[in-house]
Image: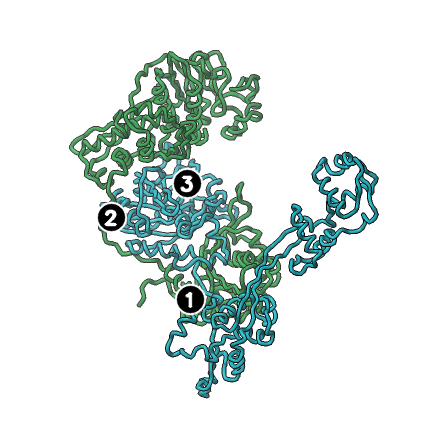
Amino acid sequence: MPVVNVKKSSIEKSFSHLSLKKIIEDLPYLGLDIEGIDEKLGIIRLEFNPNRPDFSSENGIIRGLKGIFELELGMPVIKKLSRSSFTIHVDKELFDNRPFIYSLAAKRSHPLTTEEITQLVSMQEDLHNGLGRKRKRSSIGIHNLDSLTFPLNYVLSGLDRKFTALDSNKELTIDTILKNTEMGRKYSYLIEGNKKVPLLVDSQNVVVSLPPIINGAHTKVNTDTHNLFVEVTATNSKYAKEMLSILSYELNDLEFDLFSITTHSPFEGEVVSPDLTPVIIEADAQFINKLVGVELSIQEIIKCLEKSRCNGSLKGSDTIICSAPSYRGDLFGPQDLCEEVLIGLGVGNFSPQYPSTKLVGKKNNFSKVFDKIRDVMMGLGFVEILNTSIISEHLIKSSLVDTDLSKDNYIWLQDTENTKVEALRPSLIPSMINTLSVNIHEKYPQFLFEIGKTFKQERNQIVEGWSLCTSIAHDTTDFSEIKSNLESLMKYCFDISIQTPIASKPFLLNGHSAFVSVNDTLTGYVGEFHPQVLEDFNMRTLVSVFEVDLTKLMEILNLNKNGYI
Amino acid sequence: MNQDRFKNSSENPDDHDFDKSASSLHPIERSILSVLKVRRDWITEEDLSRESDLTPDQIRRGIEWLKYKEYIQIKESTEVSFSLKFNLKQLEEYVLPERKLVNVIKGGKHSIPEIIKDDFENNSREVFGAIRYSKRNHWIMINGDNISLLEGAEKLSMDEELLRKLHAGKPLLLSGLSDQDKISFEGLRKRPDILTIQKITEKKIKIVDNNSDKIHELLNINGKIVRKMNKQILLTHEWKDLNFEQLDVEAPLPLVNCGRKNPLIDFIDEVKEILVGMGFGEIEGNYTQSSFWNFDALFIPQDHSAREMQDTFYLKKGSGIASRLEREKPLIQPITHVHTSSWNTHWNIEDAKPYVLRTHTTPVTLQYLWENLPESDKVFLIGRVFRNEKVTYKHLVEFHQVEGIFTNKDASIRQLVGIQTEFYSRLGIKKIKFWPTYFPYTEPSLQSMVYNEKLEKWIELFGMGVFRSEVVKPLGIQNPVLAWGGGFERLAMLRFDLEDIRELYSNNLKWLKSVPRCPL
């Protein structure tokens, strides 16, 4: 989860009537996790949830807190938003590329401070990563308004066009910027393969930005900058609007006057941005009360919404109309209002209620049967082990459960950076011999068993089945000992006898291995481990083993029925 | 403790003859007395152990019993043992400063200041010490600043003789030294960093002469005592004429092998029991799930970062595994609608087909809801989930999740908090806090924090919420569905006092056997 730094002094300044301790205690009730507090720098590090990108700045968090502590109720107010004559023209060639651009201008009498620039950059990064899906969906450029001349043109440009990128002093071609600069290499995959890329230029043909990669050096913002131009480009208009809304409220909090800009788009027509039209959601008060489990009056519900920085009004006798700031793209329907009410109410402020509905619980059939098998195995003196379903190709190979892995009956995982050639285990045998080999310094005899899932592929379908694997390790274990244990399990657990026709398996000693057959169906094998396997796993004693397909066994024995009588 | 044992027995009226009874001799006592009877003189514990073939521990216990019965007497003496310091013993030869001085002079140097500077690193104290000892040994004579050797400087001093013995062999005992060596020892012990000196307390044992007749008698009734009862003795009535040896009934014995359930499975069962007791029915499902059920049906947008390969394991498509989503056909239209309208983006069915290892147990719950369309129900599952993460002391790639749902026409957040509170209380957790949080598929969403008395801190446990209507409506579910869940191993770590989560799957037999079935 993203983290935002909030200065204690800023909180104290905004909430002079409340103790800092109380506010810090209540931060989690707004959905913020305290990641840490740096006493030396006087900074609280807060994690915010991805559904609330408006919490990506200190101002955003204070805006939320002001509602909870009733310093300001209802929708936050934009102090000044006027229309400007600035325009942006969008080239129709951008249709398949990054077609949306929305922007605003912001003016202030005093220049930006270093701290404000740092905060804006950090907020921009969080918005890029979350809402912008690492800039793929939408991205922001913040520029010095006074350095450019309108109208701007949003066009598609060839890769040979040259300009000076931010924090560089050389003109380079776009191709070089993409291949040879840090930002270029990091984000060029987003426009890879395109012969042309989106470019925002001003009326003098000066490059403003190469979205979503990097801004031009010409419009760089510094501590002399009073007036800002903010643009958001996107592949998805919803998130571009949301991003620009968040920035509008942020700049409003930073005491900028906002000015709208008109985009002439061949796809959308004439669009004035920022679009701060509230998100409107309707919900019945009864629905909210029922789902939250409370009995609030209409007025109380509206008050809760206001504490969550939304407005509420009544329509008819029971319907509440909620208006939320335009950046609340996380609100979809009535259910979302319940959370706003819950936060306004304070999750800590209502008592739990255990439902009186009577329902009868029970374990499922697998659990019941496995419990019995475990009981018998324990009675026979075995210790239960537990291994992972994901195992390496190497382990399958060296345990000789299959000497031909090229066949299609394994389920392999896609390789990723941290994992290489791994599969879902086709049998519990490989992990069993591996477990024995990590325990060679423990006391013998060792009696082990595991119940786990195995995976194979049959006609392009994945088959998951439960399996039981049992091993005995000591200097004189042999076929008779393991088979006797297998027969005891089957007798004591299910009162059945098994047949053991001769089998030949690469991991078992020839002549000392057999299939396990129940009611004439093969369900596993039993035998002594092949000395090659023992050697490969550094075993210095003998091991006998059996594995039984429990899913199949339960089918054969008709154990899938419920009930006892 | 052993004394108490005897005291109690002799107070028992049936045993008033105790100390005269042949059976009062334990085999250990018998062995010790046999040796002592022959020896007659004082003997060390060490020698006794060797001659009786008993372990030092058996000797220790045996002499304690015998002392109490006043068959033996014990005398303790202190002895000084000394050896060359370990680092000196490692050297091929240890040269005392006075010998070093002699060697330097032999090499042709005679000026004291020069010797101090060149050969003793300006350590004049050491040189003057060396001169003092050399003079005592009559090795040198001094004239002004000049030293010259006397005849006999080659001869080893007494100190050197002693050191040579120490260098060659074991530690020496002070009491075993000749008078001359004793003087050397006293001298050397005053010089720093040469000797390691240890005080040894030695116990010597001797038979009590006054009781030798009785002991003799005790040792001689061999014929009438047997060590063990057996079937023959029972059937022939022989037991009536026999005495039985006193066993060391207090000695601990090796443990018997015991089969046992895996501790994690055992704890999962205990939690299942709690949930069944709270009216939840157990469900089960596949570890492999289509992206459709793992993500799309849960309202997770197709460009969400959780779907990336660095977070989720995808199954290799090469061999043709991908869900055809045939069974899910009726759901495609409503899911497409929900995604398109909410995320303002195209929903691609192809992205829903690849199989993943389930990243949570929720797809199983969801399919249960879809298949059963319950109006009122409580179900749970505890099963494995997979995350493509780096394994650390607190993260595993494969772990268990516990998840439960309650659906009913009146189900509410307050009830969800109520169910959690009850569940935690049955686990023994009383201090709980709930905070709002975010999950893509529940709204409102809460997380719970519980206070752990052992760690003395708040720990984040399960997340919960009401399934979004975007999730349940397409499945045909009308009533609210309350859902909660989270990682199970976190609870297990608290249960078993583990600091490293990997230990749960290490299959270390020592650990598996050491976890008690019923931890206190």
Secondary structure at badge 1 equals: helix
Residue A420 sits in which quadrant? top right
Question: What separation in Å lies between label 3 and label 2 (alpha carbons)?
Answer: 41 Å
Which residue position holds label 3? Answer: B349
Label 2 lies in what chain? A
- CB under 8 Å between discs 3 and 1: no
Residue A383 x, y percent position in the rendering = 47, 62
- CB under 8 Å between discs 2 and 1: no
Secondary structure at badge 3 equals: helix
User: Which numbered disc flags the more N-terminal residue, 2 or 1?
Assistant: 2
Which residue position holds label 1? Answer: A376
Which residue position holds label 2? Answer: A354
Q: Residues within 10 Å of mark 1 (few under 14, many from 20)?
A: some
Q: For the image shown, how many numbered marks are present on the structure?
A: 3
Colour chain A appears in:
green
Which mark lies nearer to you, 3 or 1?
1
Amino acid type at image mark 3 = Ile
Image height of B367 relative to B309, above or below = below
Q: Residue furthest left?
A: A317
Residue A354 x, y percent position in the rendering = 24, 48
Image height of B358 relative to A404, above or below = above
Nearest the eye: B315 or B401? B401
Report whether mark 3 lies on the same chain as mark 2. Answer: no
Q: Residues within 10 Å of mark 3 (few under 14, many from 20)?
A: some
Which mark lies nearer to you, 3 or 2?
2
Colour chain B appears in:
cyan
Question: What separation in Å lies between label 2 and label 1 (alpha carbons)?
Answer: 38 Å
Residue A73 x, y percent position in the rendering = 25, 26
Question: Image quadrant for the C terminus of chain A?
Answer: bottom left
Nearest the eye: B320 or A190? A190
